[in-house]
Image (cartoon, grey):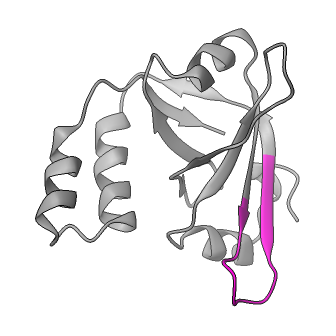
Amino acid sequence: MSNGANSLTAQDLEFLRRPLHGLLSVAGGPQPPQPRPVWFEATAEGTIQLFTSPESLKMRRLRHDPRASLVVAAPVGERERWVSVAGRITVEPDGAHDLSARLAARYWDLDDPTRAADARCGGKLEGRVDL
């Protein structure tokens, strides 16, 4: 319904503030893009942010070709709605750990000890990926 972060409407941003999974597709590679589910955050400015590991296939592909798209759809049982954003990504060296902490709180019940422990583990992150 949207063709880029700059064209996101107020209704799109409201929809994207929900804890929904996005399907990220990246260019670059001998095979067609293979969407992967991701956690994401939409900023007030309409930028879509996510984080990833430096060793991930998507990061290797994004270093080669920074084009990507994200599709977010309403869950089953709700009226059909979706938002699609496509463009060139930027990788920001800072902010990945803060973003992952915010997203863990958004997507997981951190009162669950297992989820809380997973959220604290962190891990090596490339940085914040903005679309």
Residue at 13% across, 51% down? 117
Above or below residue 39? Residue 92 is: above
* Image spot of residue 44 (x, y percent): 56, 61
Residue at 66% across, 39% down? 131
Quadrant of the image occupied by residue 102: bottom left
| Residue 45 in view of the camera | no
Quadrant of the image occupied by residue 90: top right
Above or below residue 91? Residue 102 is: below
Residue at 60% across, 14% down? 60
Q: Nearer the viewer, residue 84 or 73?
A: 73
Indicate yes or no whether the magenta region holds residue 71: no
Task: Please indicate whether residue 116 sits to the left or right of residue 6 in the image.
Answer: left
* Image spot of residue 5 (x, y percent): 75, 50
Q: Which residues are magenta?
A: 72-85
Above or below residue 6? Residue 128 is: above
* Image spot of residue 47 (x, y percent): 63, 48
Residue at 72% across, 21% down? 66
